[in-house]
Image (tube, rainbow, N blue to C red):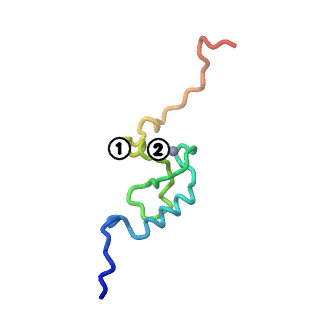
Amino acid sequence: MSGGWQGSDRKARLPSGWDRIRRMVLDRDPTCQICGVRPSTQVDHVRPKADDHSHLQGVCYPCHKHKSSSEGGKASAEVRPSRQRPAEKHPGWKE
Ligand SMILES: [Zn+2]
């Protein structure tokens, strides 16, 4: 046996074919799916523990960082069933 091959311990925790899936997602979502402005450079998990790449989306670094930092509070403030107030003009708004 030749000792030319060295097993790399890098990406040992990533699932097999992750790099390929990541490329597919970035190719599918060239633009950030959150802000829709910046080019997506990272892959974000829409659902935790998702094996299918359909649960992945391409995002840019700032949005991914912001989302991961605000994770935990599952948008409880925006899911209120209360009716939305119609857009009212401010009292001082004259035209
Ligand atoms: Zn973004």
Residue at 43% x, 65% y: name it. Answer: 18
In this view of the protein, which residue sits in the foreground, 86 or 31?
Answer: 31
Point out the image quarter for the C terminus: top right
Q: Please report contact status of discs 2 and 1: CB closer than 8 Å, yes or no.
A: no
Residue sitting at the far bottom: 1
Q: Residues within 10 Å of mark 2 (few under 14, many from 20)?
A: some
Instruction: Give the image quarter of residue 6.
Output: bottom left
x then y, percent, for residue 15: 38, 67
Q: Which residue is mark 2?
A: 63
Q: CA distance from mark 2 to mark 1?
A: 16 Å
The amino acid on which the numbered mark 1 sits, given as a three-letter code, is Gly
Q: Which residue is mark 1?
A: 72
Q: At numbered mark 1, what does the secondary structure look like: helix, strand or loop?
A: loop
Q: At numbered mark 2, what does the secondary structure look like: helix, strand or loop?
A: helix
Residue at 59% x, 16% y: name it. Answer: 90
Asked whether, in this view, residue 94 is left or right of residue 41, the answer is right
The amino acid on which the numbered mark 2 sits, given as a three-letter code, is Cys
Mark 2 residue's CB less than 8 Å from ligand 1 = yes
